[in-house]
Amino acid sequence: MQVCHSVHELRAFIARDPQAKVGFVPTMGNLHAGHCQLVTQAKQLAEIVVVSIFVNPLQFGANEDFGSYPRTLAADCEKLEAVGADVVFAPAVTEMYPDFDGHDLHQQVVIQPPALANDLCGASRPGHFAGVATVVAKLFHMVQPQVAVFGKKDYQQLMVIRALVRQLNFNVEIVAGETVRESSGLAMSSRNSYLTPAEKTQAAQLYQQLQSIKQALSAGQRDYANLCAQAKSELTEQGWQVDYVEIRRQTDLTLPNAGDHAWVILAAAKLGNTRLIDNCEVRA
Ligand code: PAF
């Protein structure tokens, strides 16, 4: 497995075999079984699999965890080697953003995603999806993959990426990877490493609320607002600071009506200092 830190090295490696189908898994590192699953999926779809590890300053708000986000390159590379990644691209911030001083975004070309990006996580994290869209577009230019795999755990992100690819004519197939969970149901996430052992046990409550709503929808209940309000109040009683619990249309995350049959239940909430997100698709 090759580790590249510069765009030049990365391009040179990929150019060695111009006929090979390139698969891509973008990450911010601190890898877990969910990421490994995305790499395994990419391996089945492509001949060369590139994994990027880059904690992207553009997608963090001023009061968020950019500085403390775990950077675990050596351990990440071991995991990636074990699942058969071919190339790890781990650039420094200055390599990715040569004109960015870390503060003044006015010198930076930024991609403005569609309105979908201002809702849900975008409402409490202004600019987050513009940062994601910008870095993913840059990475697509650098890696030039034929296929890229994104986890469904970041459901809204996946939708933003699909819009980016469709609207900016990127020649890449976007494939969704299923969420990998702990045996408790807790969705695997790099941010789970912020949780204390007690919080980690408690964190499965978020998944349990999604499951309760899923059962209610499957049983024919359609009072979306009430189902979400109930989940929010139970989480709040359990000590969570809830950002949102929402039932949306699976196709475009707009608000459903009583005639819908395919939903995604999405939730974001803080446990202690850690903001967790999760979602669950339902059809009935
Ligand atoms: O999902 C992530 O880890 C990040 O948002 C991504 C897609 C790697 C962009 O920085």
Image (spheres, rainbow, N blue to C red):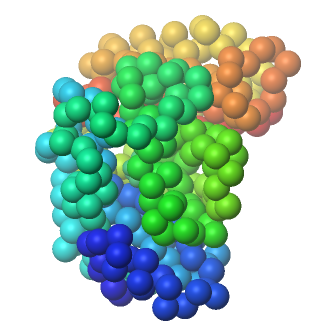
Q: Residue at x 50, y 85 (%)?
A: 15
Q: Position of residue 270 (x, y in %)?
A: 30, 26
State the residue in front, 146 or 252. 146
Q: Residue furthest bottom?
A: 16
Q: Is residue 84 above or below residue 197?
A: below
> Which residue lies at the image location 62% right of the left edge and 67% below the top edge?
147
Q: Nearer the viewer, residue 147 or 92?
A: 92
Please say whether residue 278 is visible from this viewpoint: no
> In the picture, which quadrant includes the C terminus?
top right
179 or 284: nearer the eye?
179
Q: Quadrant of residue 197?
A: top left
Q: Whole-percent x and y of residue 134?
A: 44, 44
Tell me residue 237's x, y (percent): 33, 13
Is residue 107 shown left or right of residue 260? Answer: left
Q: Quadrant of residue 58?
A: top left
Query: Left or right: 159 with respect to 135?
Result: right
- At 57% from the left edge and 39% from the top edge, which residue is drawn? 160
Picture residue at 23% right of the left edge, 32% below the top: 104
Query: Residue placed farthest to the right in the image?
Result: 259
